[in-house]
Amino acid sequence: MKLSRQFTVFGIAIFCVVVFSLYLMLDHIDHSKNPNGERIQNGQLGILQDKIDHLERLLAENNEIIANIRDSVINLRETVKDGKMFPEGNMSQGNVELLPPAPALLPIHSEDCQFAAQTYSKAADGVQMLDVYDLLSFDNPDGGVWKQGFDISYQDNEWDNEPLQVFVVPHSHNDPGWLKTFDDYYRDQTQHILNNMVVKLHEDSRRKMIWSEISYFSKWWDSIDEQKRDAVRRLIESGQLEVATGGWVMPDEASSHYFALIDQLVEGHQWLEINLGVKPKTGWAVDPFGHTPTHAYLLRQAGLSNMLIQRVHYSVKKHFASQKTLEFFWRQNWDQDSSSDILCHMMPFYSYDVPHTCGPDPKICCQFDFKRLPGGRISCPWRIPPQAITDNNIQERVQTLLDQYRKKSKLFRTNVLLAPLGDDFRYAEAVEWDQQFENYQKLFDYMNSHPELHVQAQFGTISDYFEALRKSTGMDPVGMNVGQLALPVLSGDFFTYADRDDHYWSGYFTSRPFYKRLDRVLESHLRAAEVLYSLTLANIQKYGQPSDYPAVDNYKLLTEARRNLGLFQHHDAITGTGKDWVVVDYGTRLFHSILNVKRVIVSSAHWLVLKDKPAYYHDPSNPFLQMVSAAESVAKKCFIKMLNFFAVPRLLVVYNPTEQARTSMVTVYVTTPKVRVLNALGHVVRAQVSAVWNDASHAATDLSFVAQAAPLGLSVYQLMEGMEPRTEAAKYMFLQDGGQISVSKLEHFPQFYQQDAAPVHIENPHLKLSISTTAALWNISCLQKMRLKEDDAEFLVKVEFVWYGTTSNKDKSGAYLFLPDKEATIYSPSQPPVVRVTKGLLFSEVTTTFTQITHTLRLYNIHGVEGQSVELCNTVDIRGEINHEIAMRITSDLNSKDRFFTDLNGYQVQPRKTMAKLPLQANFYPMTSMVYLQDSSARLSLLTAQSLGAASLKSGQLEVIMDRRLNQDDNRGLGQGVLDNKITANSFRLLLEKRSSAEEETAPNSYPSILSHMSYMYLNHPLISMAVSQRSVSLLSQEEGGGPSEQAALILHRKGFDCGFSNRNTGLLCSTTRGKIRLEKLLTDLKVKSITPVSLSLMHTHNSDADPQEISLKPMEIRTYRLQLS
């Protein structure tokens, strides 16, 4: 099957992940009932009705943008040629916006508030992980041969009525990068494992094998001939080879965002469906360092029925083993019924290698790892080698192994036993296949021919095991009914992982933060590119014109980007736990894919923004649009060059990648501070010019203005050179060492002064911040107080920085482990920092430059989402440090006690409890999108643009580790410290919200507010600005060639939110819709030819009698549809 088939069966569109947050779909605003019980007066109702009518008219117009922006680039070019840019007199006539004013109160339907408000009810036989943590003492007594467990005994006659059924599951764990790069591992090991697999499984039909990483499998598939491919298909059909999970990688479960988790799952499952027709049934995760219920939910939604996990805290494993709860139905914290349940098996012992999988005694199990036979390259550390099985020793060997199997089975509720047989990169040589399979087959033959042993043993796949387990308990083969022998229902997560002693794996939550940030940048750009690409394809169909739009090239770029993003979700990639050169390899892939998806964004936006479609032409060497957001430009210093006063204005196309109409700041570099900004109607837009500080030559100026764009829409702005009263220069003040300093060469920008030692204030319509300049210089505390203007409430919110060292014990912190020497010490720089205060029309900020950190607090002077939170940016450089980790600490006067909340994978929020019985490092948890704390009156949230480790070690306090530099290995196999630090910018939003209704204090779930969800989206998915290049239009010849199919995948997520917070002044032009969405409203300008509900990764098609045009989702639900647009 040739590769081209991949382009035509589904095409990119099928992977296009458009996560519409349904609760904010633009809809008729339902103002009949307000949850806060505030009655809107009749007079206001009339005004509101007018606004709604106006809104709907404008929305209809604005959605037209996708195909036919009214004041499109071409029109503007023509008017310029005619010499009449805009109607005279319109130049500075007021600030007319494209979007109508937002209602003061965001309309929220009362039904939408019931979900978060419902009281939690635990299943009768339920296990809640928060309770387990309360219960455990986390002591670590010596358990005998099973060091972290206990002695296991049994009676010989226990299996007389029902024999023990043993499934030995051969597996080879192939890391797509760790000590070698992905390509080097493939060349040296993986290709040989897969080649040998085909030969060796065919030698004996009783042999079995499982495989999970499709990144490797697809690379190998591309290199083998059709004959070998047919052999693989036969092995799969006969059940000898099973693909478990079937994702692109076995992803990390702490630092990965659910967008990227879905991406790598879809990529793997679609590859399997197209090339092998395979639909995985069982998840297999033996190596991720802790486990998240988010992954369990995604697997269930993808149509998998079972899953296996391994790396769980040793105290939890021991407790579950003693209670026989190692097998359970994993249910989401927020799920009130059993719709999210998936059957899960937790491996009981230390590792997934052979010494720790046959039973509790590794010294004995190691003797049954026949790769370690004398004369080989690896041996048993317990110094008792395996023996080849012969007629002379078989009886004794069977008794020894069976004793381990029986002991292990005593930890479970059934007589079906799982014994994995494998390790990292196993079965690479033909001799190992022979050693393992021939010796085990002899053991099985002996066991099975001696009925007095009451055992039935065989090779199996992981699904063979689960099938037998379900049968033995009277369970449905794939469903989740509990069966005769009830298994418990468990809710919660398995962080933070410890494998021994006080060795908590909380270091990797932050390790290599530069790359964790790069991951999010690619994720955001990829999402934007996939939406634009899909809309462009549908649009090209609509106009029916042949086009030289590079559909096939863009498809290839998107596929490669999805695969590079998927690869980086691997549990040694995003975790920051690979060798230096491997990290560079991942980083290079991410960076190239960011550049490539920008090409897709630019070429797609070019088509969509043109009114005169036949004028479209594609010239990759000189693209019509160029990405120009200031953040992107820092490295390349690409300015929008201004022309002479009456020359052609520069045009700026702004794309909104989010699903709500949006008002946000856009910043671009310009070469002159004398700039006028006009919107597509020709009205002047207020703007702010600021100095660019990281450029010694001062050749550039930042131009910021507030742009408006429809949902997933494009807006056009014009930039002209010239004096403009509505473009204001920022003013500056500089402080150092408690006094003010003046800066020369600050042409164009006024300086201002105030009384020394007085606090600096910056404010906007929503917030007022107090920054104590003396403290900022001596105790290194930046922010001091936050005042909410809505009700004038003032809160203590103090930001400072702290250092952690590493312990003096033999085992020290490294890439995986966080082993601090003591509580953190306050960061005090060697010289007093310079403080720069900026005050401007559109934003004000305070930047403090320390030796290792540049810390900026910014307030946007915008009504709505952007203005409700404080933007924090810390640029960290600890390259000169030795065994130091730097953290940001936020101290408030909220009485949060020992409770705080971190998210899991950006999908859901997990309550946490700081426990005195645990060491400091155990109280750190992964923060993928947010961490918050609260009391009865308020909530303080820190939203993040990158995954990091977070804690709340004292009441009212949050702490986030921003970077770590460690000089030694932590003995987990990496063989190096973390010394490849880069200058890393960490971005956050700090959001303070008053509570109007209290949350149940002990509930195992919690939800962000709508404002918090939106602030997170704005932080992680900024507006994308593109400048129109200055060139003449010429037409190129058409290219022939197969492209992607007409189908797209639409992935929808209805978020859960807490209504107990203010819904005033959000600036949002929408209302909640009770989870209902009408497609013709969503895709105004496009026709839906067909829509089919499918499983998350498009493997299974669901039958549905519902109206295909109206979709309805439950809170928290993620659902996929196969969509055909025209």
Image: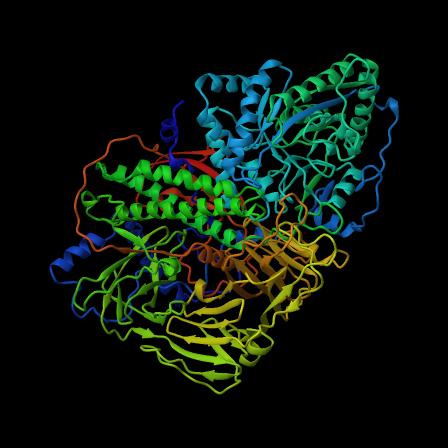
Given the current orientation, which residue lies at the most extreme bottom position? 755
Identify the image quadrant of the C terminus. top left
Residue 45 image position (x, y, % from top left): 40, 63
In the image, taking residue 1088 as reference, residue 773 lies left or right, namely right
User: In this rendering, would 700 be left or right of 235?
Assistant: left
Residue 745, quarter of picture: bottom left
Describe the colour scheme in one phrase: rainbow
Image position of 290 with respect to 189: above or below: below
Q: Which of the two residues, 500 or 328, is positioned nearer the viewer here?
A: 500
Residue with the most extreme left position: 82
Looking at the image, residue 106 sits to the left or right of residue 820; the answer is: left
Q: Position of residue 964 (x, y in %)?
A: 59, 57
- Residue 1100 visible in the snapshot: no
In depth, the one of 395 and 1093 nearer the eye is: 395
**Depth check: 898 or 394 in front?**
394
Viewer-side residue, 510 vs 98:
510
The image quadrant of residue 211 is: top right
Residue 512 shows up from this direction? yes
Looking at the rendering, in which quadrant would you find the N terminus? top left
The structure residue drawn at horizontal position 68% and vertical position 66%, both measured from the top left corner, is 955
